Amino acid sequence: MEITTRSLWTLIHGMGFGALYLLAGSGAIVELYRRNLADSPPQSALGGDRFLGIYLSAMAALAWFAVLTGTYIIYPWYRATPPTGTAELGAYPRSLLLSHPATR
């Protein structure tokens, strides 16, 4: 099994930044729910707020890394136009999908 450069960047983009962002998003939802419970006792605001600030900053960084790697690394490879007469379209995903009526 071989991991190409494109495969590696796709893994970093999707499983690295994207998946971690989704996990962090579910954690943020749980934390917001926990903080807004009516019967929850007051907590130490300083430590909790500082952690939440760092957590949300890391979440924003993950989201931006996913967007930037997708926009400037993954998407140009997807949209690449194959040279005229190319029979093997495996390196050109958009053209490969458009070449068959079932996937068009």
Image (spheres, rainbow, N blue to C red):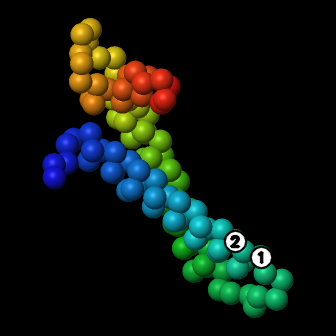
Q: CA distance from mark 1 to mark 2?
A: 6 Å
Residue identifier under label 2: 32
Can you see residue 20? yes
Q: Residue at 46% x, 58% y: name it.
A: 19
Q: Residue at x 83, y 83 (%)?
A: 38
**Alpha-carbon neighbours of circle 2 within 10 Å: few (<14), some, or many (≥20)?**
few
Outermost residue toward the top in this view? 84
Residue density around tag 1, few if under 14, some if 14–19, many if 20 or more, within 10 Å: few
**Residue found 38% across the figure and 56% down from its top:** 16
**What amino acid type is highlighted by mark number 2?**
Leu
* Amino acid beneath label 1: Asn
Considering every residue shown, the one lying at the far left of the view is 2
Q: Which mark is residue 85?
A: none
Q: Give the answer, above or below, for where 100 lies relative to 17.
A: above
Q: Secondary structure at mark 1?
A: loop
Q: Which residue is mark 1?
A: 36
From the viewer's side, name the closer residue of 2 and 85: 85
Q: Is residue 53 visible?
A: no
Instruction: Give x and y (percent) for residue 72.
Output: 38, 32
Q: Position of residue 102 (x, y in %)?
A: 49, 29
Q: Are marks 1 and 2 in contact (CB under 8 Å)?
A: yes
Q: Which corner quadrant of the image does residue 99 belong to?
A: top left
Quarter assignment of residue 88: top left
